[in-house]
Image (cartoon, rainbow, N blue to C red):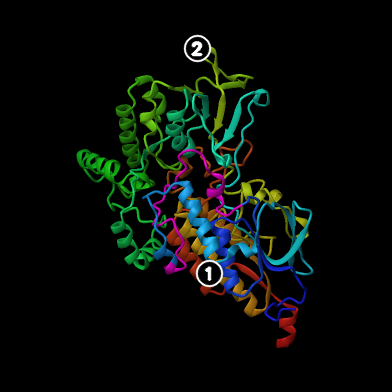
């Protein structure tokens, strides 16, 4: 038996990680550096996680590439050259593969393997993991690095099985690509993936009909190629910039204008919005003033500005009216960034259907049928694209049948919404860790920075457990309860809970409406550091019998 283990029971692996996206790959790298034997199970045939599956036309990150990258190795930061300000999916996937090869990660990655279940053995303090190849493996530490946007939300429409054309999901796109040339295409959903893919599909299709339930706020990305000079300037300051982002609420440099939107004149406010719209673009827009996410009156000013922009871009007043959110709150849903989205509705081959007024009744053999004030209308289509997003935050975690103490199911425990301490662990499931789980900043931050912080925290915790002869770690019930309350209290100070969004799981029928991410990366980091400094305050650490006997 390996002497570094505080447990006398032999296991197949020290740690088993689920998911070979950016979180899983970094988790593997860190634990291998600590000398642990690790296996990563990945259901796909390659690395990249979200960026392996999301290959829809126009798929692109909304965080700037130079920040959306690993920071654990400066040599990697210096050698990699991002081509654009906001890199597209193929470039991000290329980067993921480069990392896998550079650090020889594939040796411990097992592809085309879906984890079906995991159960905790209380007597032996280990996890048994079952996979779809009929095999099982054991490990002391079980780490879910399955990502927050990795399980497709596939709504069920009456008659869909009868449709004789092609059906696609932006969240599970064919790897060989799709040619829409000369095709009549229906696109259902106008969230981020729908907004990104609409202009590209419209350029190919003979006719594109967009079915919109809820209008979305979107701002221009202002994407562009990066020059060598720009890349080199960032690379020369990477250490300073990384330290700065760790101190920011969203773990990225949004160039916050630390002034209230209500403290300036309407003319000055308009000038700032115009500057952000024309020069910065993207998520930087929400940093135009410091109270846009906290004050509803301030938020109205940015909503009115974007609505005016939509009416100015879209030439058909009826389409503009449908596309412009009415009494909407900017940011309660993730603000989308686009390249030519609203302009696309000026094309002669693009139609728009407001399904809030004319709901989809059924999918027929040859198209989509809606019924509204204008009666029943049939839209003949050759292809249907569902841009209906993900079962976010919890979908992948609950996609595995995880059973903890006493055979308790995680699905049952979270039936009324996810409950964690720091988004890292949940009571009753010892040695189960979640990377960027619900209750952590995750999707309300630069995911790569949140992954960096979580992986380092988890790996450092495991190192402590190993050196101290601790066989189990899990949260105290009081700590978990207090953290869940705190996450909701912080959210209630903002505009985030004021609308239905995937932050609350309201895009998935039957899912309990609970605000899942934690707001404030910098305050979260400080909390984690305080917890560790106080000897893992809020956690129960169980020493091994062997350790106790040695010190008796």
- Asked if the magenta segment contains residue 55, the reply would be yes
**Residue tagged by mark 1?**
531
The answer to whether mark 1 and mark 2 are in CB contact below 8 A is no
Q: Nearer the viewer, residue 252 or 473?
A: 252
Q: Nearer the viewer, mark 1 or mark 2?
A: 2
The correct choice, above or below, for 266 with respect to 79 in the image is above
Find residue 295 and name its label.
none
Where residue 463 sits, quadrant-wise, is: bottom right
Label 1 Cα neighbours within 10 Å, binned few <14 / some 14-19 / many ≥20: some
**Residue tagged by mark 2?**
374
Q: In this view of the protein, can residue 237 be seen by the observer?
A: no
Residue drawn at x 34%, y 31% is 307
4 relative to 54 in the view: left or right: right
The correct choice, above or below, for 534 with respect to 328 in the image is below
Q: Which residues are magenta?
A: 46-75
Q: In this view of the protein, can residue 164 be seen by the observer?
A: yes
């Amino acid at each position: 038996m390996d002497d570094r283990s505080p447990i006398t029971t032999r296991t197949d692996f020290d740690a088993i990680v689920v998911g070979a996206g950016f979180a899983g790959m970094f988790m593997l790298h860190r634990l291998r550096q600590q000398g642990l034997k690790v296996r990563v199970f990945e259901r796909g045939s390659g690395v990249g996680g979200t960026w392996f599956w999301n290959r829809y036309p126009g798929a692109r990150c909304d965080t700037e590439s130079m920040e959306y990258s690993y920071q654990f190795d400066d040599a990697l930061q210096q050698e990699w050259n991002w081509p654009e300000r906001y890199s597209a999916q193929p470039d991000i996937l290329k980067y993921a593969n480069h990392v896998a090869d550079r650090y020889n990660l594939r040796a411990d990655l097992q592809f085309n393997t879906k984890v079906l279940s995991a159960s905790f053995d209380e007597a032996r303090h280990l996890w048994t993991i079952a996979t779809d190849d009929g095999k099982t493996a054991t490990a002391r530490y079980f780490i879910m690095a399955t990502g927050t946007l990795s399980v497709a939300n596939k709504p069920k429409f009456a008659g869909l099985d009868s449709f004789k054309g092609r059906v696609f999901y932006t969240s599970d796109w064919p790897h060989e690509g799709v040619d829409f040339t000369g095709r009549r295409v229906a696109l259902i959903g106008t969230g981020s993936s729908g907004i990104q893919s609409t202009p590209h599909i419209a350029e190919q299709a003979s006719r594109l009909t967009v079915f919109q339930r809820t209008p979305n706020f979107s701002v221009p990305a202002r994407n562009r190629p990066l020059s060598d000079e720009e890349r080199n300037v960032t690379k020369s300051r990477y250490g300073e910039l990384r330290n700065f982002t760790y101190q920011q609420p969203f773990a990225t440099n949004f160039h916050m204008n630390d002034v209230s939107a209500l403290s300036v004149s309407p003319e000055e406010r308009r000038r700032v919005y115009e500057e952000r719209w024309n020069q910065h673009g993207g998520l930087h827009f929400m940093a135009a003033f410091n109270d846009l996410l906290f004050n509803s009156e301030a938020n109205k000013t940015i909503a009115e500005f974007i609505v005016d922009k939509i009416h100015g871009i879209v030439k058909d007043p009826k389409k503009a009216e449908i596309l412009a959110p009415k009494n909407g709150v900017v940011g309660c849903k993730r603000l989308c960034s686009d390249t030519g989205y609203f302009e696309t509705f000026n094309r002669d081959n693009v139609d728009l259907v407001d399904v809030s007024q004319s709901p989809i009744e059924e999918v027929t053999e040859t198209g989509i049928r809606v019924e509204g004030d204008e009666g029943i209308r049939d839209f003949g289509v050759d292809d249907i694209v569902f841009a209906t997003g993900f079962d976010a935050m919890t979908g992948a975690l609950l996609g595995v049948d995880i059973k903890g103490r006493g055979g308790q199911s995680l699905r049952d425990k979270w039936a009324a919404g996810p409950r964690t301490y720091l988004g890292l662990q949940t009571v009753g499931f010892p040695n189960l860790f979640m990377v960027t789980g619900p209750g952590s900043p995750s999707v309300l931050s630069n995911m790569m920075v949140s992954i960096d912080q979580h992986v380092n925290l988890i790996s450092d915790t495991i190192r402590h457990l190993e050196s101290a002869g601790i066989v189990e770690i899990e949260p105290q019930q009081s700590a978990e309860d207090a953290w869940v309350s705190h996450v909701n209290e912080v959210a209630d100070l903002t505009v985030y809970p004021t609308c239905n969004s995937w932050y609350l799981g309201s895009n998935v029928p039957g899912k309990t409406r609970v605000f899942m991410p934690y707001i404030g990366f910098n305050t979260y980091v400080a909390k984690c550091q305080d917890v560790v400094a106080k000897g893992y305050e809020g956690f129960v650490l169980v020493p091994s019998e062997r350790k106790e006997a040695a010190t008796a």
